Amino acid sequence: MEIEKLVVKTGTQCSLRCEKCGEFNPYFLQKGKSFSFDVKSLSADISRIYQNVESIKCIHIAGGEPFLHQDLCLLLSFLYSLDRIQKVEIVTNGTVLPDVITLKELSSNKQRVRVIISDYSSAGIDNNALVNAFHSEGVAYRLSKNMVWKDKSDISFKPYSAQELLDIANNCSTYRKEHYFSLINGIITAHCPTAGSLLYYLDLYRESSSAFTNLRLIPNSEILNELTRLQSLEALPMCKYCIPSYLAKDCLAGEQIKK
């Protein structure tokens, strides 16, 4: 198996409190379920997946805000050592300036690592300091302009039928069909990163038991079979707590929670 993209969440800590956060980070804090994973655990989980696949085209590091993770530079150094990982992406909200060591790590391997800066200027959020630092240090980056978010804040149960779940899988822009996985604290899911976040946020493990695998509870010999099984799922039960992109209303990207 060749993994197209593996989304790795480093934690929920963030410098912003976006009202319509697609990863529910401000609301993890309200529920007392915020997390920040240590690099040793993150590296071990990624390593176990890496050992059992042909290659990983892209590791996509997400948060929260990854540049708030105190050991991000160590995670980057570990990922650089894995030669069958073709590319590393880091997505940032543009408000946190990495420390000097992390900037050096980012610039030292710019053929493989790229930072994606979410442009929330329409919500009054400034990313100029980060952009200037990247220019100065020669860090490869892309600025995602003119962002439009979808309002998926309604996480109430929705009694979708089996056919409706298939329709969501076939039409929702968040649902990726091929070789797409998400990793949160050893729990791996397929197809949709929002589904993985909902699994953790709403404690949907019992009713969604077929839709995830805990890497830390299975031997190496079973990992490829589990990845193949997750990839073969035609629909996800976690979608019953989400609004598909084609039904969700547009909202302002980066709008902050009013105090």
Image (cartoon, rainbow, N blue to C red):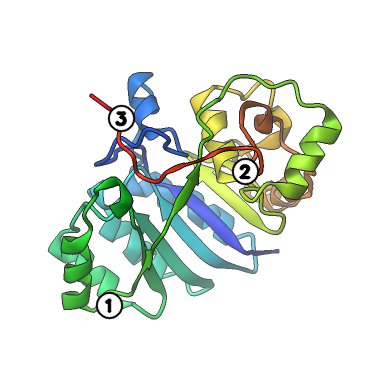
Residue located farthest toward the right when viewing the structure as drawn: 163
Foreground pick, 231 / 18: 18
Q: Position of residue 122 (x, y in %)?
A: 32, 51
Q: Is residue 196 left or right of residue 11?
A: right
Disc 2 to disc 3, C-alpha distance: 22 Å
Q: CA distance from mark 2 to mark 1?
A: 37 Å
**According to the image, label 1 marks what residue?**
108
Q: In which quadrant will I find the C terminus?
A: top left
Label placed on residue 245: 2
Three-letter residue code for mark 3 = Ile
The label nearer to you, 3 versus 1, is: 3
**Pointers 3 and 1 in contact (C-beta within 8 Å):** no
Instruction: Please tell me which of labels 3 and 1 falls first in the chain.
Output: 1
Inspect the image, locate mark 2, and give the three-letter code of the amino acid beneath it: Ser
Q: Residue at x 40, y 70 (%)?
A: 81
- Residues marked 2 and 1 touching at CB (< 8 Å): no
Kindly identify the residue that appears in the image at 19 percent across and 58 percent down.
98
